[in-house]
Amino acid sequence: MLVHNAIGCTLVDLGVTTVFGVVGSGNFHFTNAMVERGARFIAARHEGGAATMADAFARMSGEVAVLSLHQGCGFTNALTGIAEAAKSNTPMLVLTAEATEPSSNFFIDQQGIGDGLGAVTMRVRSPKTAVDDVARAFAMCRNHQRTVVLNVPLDVQDMELDSSLTPRTFERISAPQPSPADVARFVELLLAAERPVFVAGRGSRAEGSKDAILQLAEQSGALVATSAVSRGMFNDDPWSIDVSGGFSSPLTAELIAQADLIVGFGCALNMWTMRHGKLIADDAAVVQIDTDPAAIGMHRDVTLGLWGGVAETARATSAWLEAHGRSHREGYRTADVKSRIGMGLRWNEIEFTDESGEGLIDPRTLSAELNKILPTERIVSVDSGNFLGYPSMYLDVPDEYGFCFTQAFQSVGLGLATGLGAAIAQPHRLPIAACGDGGFLMGISELETAVRLKIPLLVIVYNDSMYGAEVHHFGTDGPPLDSVTFPDTDIAAIARGYGCEAATVRDVSDLSELESWLSSNPQRPFVIDAKIVSREGSWWLQEAFGH
C-alpha cells in the first residue's frame, strides 16, 4: 500500500464520513482512497467554498470534517475559510498536499501560513510514521476541538508503506473536572446573587451540558441566555431570554444589564456577546467557565475563572447545592420577570413600523413573514453584513443545531457555502442561507454545487445594491461612497441561469412563488432576490460596529 492510500483508509477507519474539497493532482489519490473506503466526497467549485462547507458541517454534525486540498494554490484559495474555522475552534482536518522542493511553482511555506491562521500545523513525515501522523492529527481535532492543517509532502505520499503498521489509539479525552475550591467559590457567588444570568456559548454544546446548565439555573434562580453561536439551545425553557449581545432585544439587554452575577459557560464574554461590556453592570460579579485556561479572562477581568468542563462544573455545583439544602432559590425568577418575558421578548414579537414602499420591502417585514411561511424544522445560516441581524433574530430556529454562524472572522462571502455545509450535516431540515447581495455574489460559484447536489436550499438575498455596513458606517455626509455602492443587479435572473428557481421580492405578496416551491418537494434551490429598504444601519450595527 502507498502512503496516500493509507492516509485515506486510516481517516475513514477513525470515523471520517464526509470530505469536502477541490481535487487536483496533489490530493487526487488520498481523496479517492477515502471515497473507496466509504466516505462521501463533496466536490466544491472553489477551495474557499469547500473550506466553509467543511467548517459548517463540523459545527452542525458534531463530527470531524475533512477538507482535501491541492498543494500551494489550492491551499491558499482556502485560507479565509480555514481562518474562520481556526478562530471558532472547529474540529476540522485540512488535508493538503505539500510541495517541498523550492523550485516548484507550488512551493510556499504552508506550515508558516497554517500557524499564522491560528491552526495547528502537522506533517506526514515519512512512510514509517504516516499512519501515526494521521491518527495524531485526527485526535487533535476530535479531542481538543482544533482546526489542524496536515501537510502531506508529494514525495512522501507516493512512497511504499509498511503494511504491518497500524495507528496508535488516541482515546477521547474527558473534559477537566473543576477543583473543589473553585466549586466552593462558585457556590458562594451563586448564593450571594439575587439576579444571576447564565450565558451559554459554543463550549456548552458538548454532550450533557445543556441539561446540566438548566438544572443549575433552576436551583439557583438564574435566567438563561446564549451567545449567537448557541442560539436556540434553551428554546423550551420558560426562563430563557434568548441571545446576549448585539442581537439582544431591548428586554433581553435590560435583564442582562441588571444582573448582579453573570456566568459564562464555555463563552468568551467578548465585545459582541457583552456589547463592549455594556451588558455587565459595574458591580456585577463575573464567572467564566472554560476548558481552555488561556480563554479565561481574555476579553475582560473576571471575579472567578473556573477551569473545567461545562457539564462537569454545572453538575458538581448542583450536587453541592443539593447536598446542603440550598437548591430552591427564587433569584431572578420572579413573577414580574416571568410576566415580562411572556409578553414578548424576541424581535419577531416586537411591533415595528413597516417602512416598505416604492418597490422596496422592509427587511423586518420580509424576515417576519418568512418566519411564518417556512417550516419549523429548519437550519439557518448567515453571511456577514448590515442585514445580518434580520435573519439571525427574526427567523426562529428549533435548537442549537438550527443556526450556523460562521462569523468569528467577520468575512463577507461565506454565507452560501455555510448553508451548504449545514444542509449536508442536517439533511432532514430545510436549509436557509441568508446573504447580502455583496456576499452572495462573492461566493456565487457554490450555487452550482447546490444545484448539482439537488439540495433544496433557500437562499435569501437582502439586496440593497451596496456594502451596507460600510455605507451606513461612513454616512452620506462623509466621503464619496462610489466604491461601496453598485447598480441594481437582477440576482433572480442570475440564479435561474444556474438552474435555480427564483423570485424578485418587493412586497410580501411576491412570496407566493416560494410557497409553491415549498409544497413541491423541491429538488433544487430557490433564490429570493429581496429588494430591501436600507436607509440606515441596522440596530445591531449601530450598537456594535467597531474593529
Image: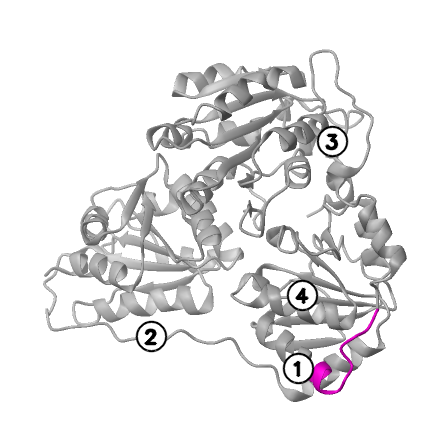
The mark found on residue 170 in the picture is 2
Foreground residue, 336 or 420?
Answer: 336
* Residue type marked 4: Leu
Tag 3–tag 1 contact (CB < 8 Å): no
Q: Is residue 150 positioned above or below 353 on the image?
A: below
Eye-nearest disc, 2 or 1: 1
* Residue type marked 3: His
Residue appearing at x 75%, y 57% in the figure:
239
Q: Magenta stretch: give its range.
A: 319-330
Distance between the Cα atoms at labels 2 and 1?
31 Å
The mark found on residue 515 in the picture is none
Q: Is residue 505 positioned above or below 215 on the image?
A: above
* Residue type marked 1: Ala
Residue 380 is situated, as x and y percent measured from the top left of the image, at: 55, 40
The mark found on residue 319 in the picture is 1
Tag 3–tag 2 contact (CB < 8 Å): no
Q: Is residue 131 left or right of residue 519?
A: left
Eye-nearest disc, 3 or 1: 1
The mark found on residue 472 in the picture is 3
Using the rendered image of the protein, determine whether residue 308 is visible from the camera's viewpoint: no
> Mark 4, residues whose alpha carbon is within 10 Å: few (<14), some, or many (≥20)?
many
Mark 4 sits on what residue? 214
Q: Earlier in the sequence, mark 3 or mark 1?
A: 1
Quarter of the rendering occupied by the N terminus? bottom left
Q: Is residue 109 left or right of residue 459?
A: left
Residue 135 is situated, as x and y percent measured from the top left of the image, at: 29, 68
